Amino acid sequence: MTVVSSGNAITFAGDGAQTVFDFNFRIFNADDLCAVVRNGDGKQKTLVAGSDFKIISDIGADSGGKVQYPVSGSPLRNGESITLFREIAYTQDLELVDNDPFSARLLNEAFDRGVMRDQQLQEQVDRALKYDISTPGEDRLSPQKLVMTISSARDEAVSARTGAVEAEGNTRGMLNDAKAAQAASEVARDNALEAQAEAEKARDAAIKISVGDISELRSPAPILSGPAEAPEGTTVSIIVSNYQNDGITSYGINTGGFGSALISGNTIKWTLGTVDADISKQVEVVCRRRGELYSDTAIYRVLVKKIIVQNGPTIAFADSVEGYPGATVSEGSISAPAHSVGLNNSRQIVSAKPEITVVGVSEIPAGFGVKLGAGVTGEYLGPKKNLTLKKAVPGSNILPKMTGPATGGCIISCSSNDGGFPAWKVGNRTLGGGSNDMWIANVTAGVVTTADLTFTFNSVKIASGLRFILGPFDGASSDYQCRTVKVFLDNVPYKTFNMGDISTGPRPRDLLFGENKSFTVMKLRCSNSTSGKWIGSKDIEILGAGTSAPSTKKVLVVVGSESNKDKILKADGVHKTIIVGDNEVEVESVNEVKNAGGEFVTTIILKTALANAPSDDTEIVIPDRCTLSPANYTHAVDGDDLKITGAEIALEDNPKLKRLAMAVKGDGVKFKGGKIYIKEKP
């Protein structure tokens, strides 16, 4: 993993009710989390893990976890606060042994602990009084001398005040001597009073700092304003009236885990979470100017109003191919498996209850089931759809037409030729029915048999793959099957191809590299796992330089006769994954063009790169997005039919969910269509 958050502490204000608090940073074990409580007088108390507070979930999670405080007793009162912070021990427990295997996870954890200790030290340094970095060394005082300097400044301020008072007294004594002296003394008095005020201000600030009161060093607290109440799930705008856009002022926002917030200019956008009943929630905001301490915490409270759910319209699907495209639809019934189209609602859907009318049965059939899919308006919800990778385009044959073992700068040899079937015949471009047009290697029967077929060129060649031209064979062709080919380029193993039973399947059989490779000597280690004693082939072509497959670990390129862009990823949609081979991966973005031939070329950008680039036979699939199943079913006879109703399914609380689809499964099940009873937000 990596440590992507710089935070290692979080503070919550008490409200007389809350006892569960979220921390938003990772800990490795319970001993890494500490807590303190601060009362209304500013006095701090260190809490004891287990007896005062306890961790109730998610130890080791990157996103943090939850803490209960107090374990017993009354919740934090208004004016009190609790601070949760991470404290990693200053030890190094990982020991690596020479030449032993080691775990990447353990190394990552050791590195993460080091970064967390750095953050821990940085947080402590941020709370210290510091000189500017440009302050000369001789001007930097030790903490003891700094306190002495502050005390001296205080004494000098008091002395200055005394001197000012004495000066004022002397000036008053001179008033009777001359008007000019009077005017001068008044000026001196005013200056002295101004100096006195400044001295007193400096003295008071110095006294506060010397006794631990650092309010003079804090940035001003933000002044917040906004609506007094708002519905759950909506976004509230909070204005910071004293917002500073000076490049040196920053703001911190804490929603206490209720929704999310961000600041843009002088406006905080707070997206509220959901609630079970009307309740007051708060967001905390702090300000900090460079060179100053964090401001006092400003708190904005809003009454979050519960939105009452109401019954929505019934979503009914047509009892035809328009309702279930691709399904077998006969008069009066639809045969499962069948996947419906998606239908939209005008408001957010919060729950769904499916109902299917099945024909010809009086009990729920074995294997029957219904699944629902939910998404945004217009989003593709299934069924599963296979995508076709844009493949490499191989070049033409670079092997000369062989008339003997050496022809046109190429020599073909075999580790085990058999009589009149020499190796060079794989390049003679003769596909007659006789076996004498084949290459056949005589190998040991009854075991896994191999033979090396070698092509040696007199100059460097470039190839993009091989083509085995497999027929027609004679009656004994099954004995000659080459089932596995391991390719060596200049005696270096390159790639292995498994062809299986080549007496059936596509002919010719192309074995594409997926890239252009240069070589002088190409060796094909051919094997036959049957009990026969030969390996052979009619013709083999070496395909020259071609166009490489465009897909990479991060980018997939697929082609098709119809658009797949919005099926893969719809803007603002909730479904963002596809399946690549055996892995479900998240899609970041999709682009698509239609070429001159009417083919759609779709480029899929993955959020995280694959371990390996896909090969031509890698399966790329848009998954079936109907994945929500009722917990149970009830049924009732309805005339000659059976009405089956699934339990209500609660959906994710997402204002964008306005579309549903259904999939019906079960061998031999026939039904008359389906409907979904929904509940919605007003």
Image (spheres, rainbow, N blue to C red):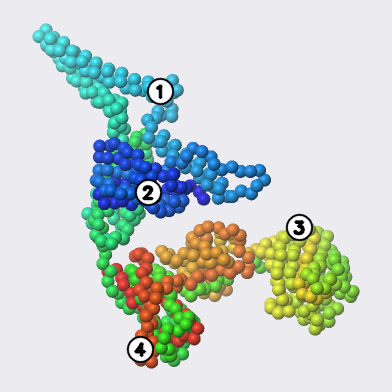
Report the amino acid beneath label 4. Asp
Report how far apart the C-alphas of labels 4 and 1 lie in the structure: 91 Å
User: How far apart in space, not on screen, are marks 3 and 4 (Cα)?
Assistant: 72 Å
Residue found at x 36% / y 64%: 654
Front-most of residues 582 and 382: 582
Q: Nearer the viewer, residue 32 or 523?
A: 32
Comes first in the chain, label 1 or label 3: 1
Mark 2 or mark 4, which is nearer the start of the sequence?
Answer: 2
Query: Residue 68, can we see it?
Result: yes
Location of residue 105 in the rendering, given as x and y in whole percent from the top left corner: 55, 50
Q: Which mark's residue is nearer the viewer, 1 or 3?
A: 1
Q: Does 606 sit left or right of 49 as displayed?
A: right
Pointer 3 residue:
492
> Is there a contact, CB below 8 Å, between mark 3 and mark 4?
no
Q: Which residue is mark 4?
A: 638
Q: Which quadrant of the view contains residue 438?
A: bottom right
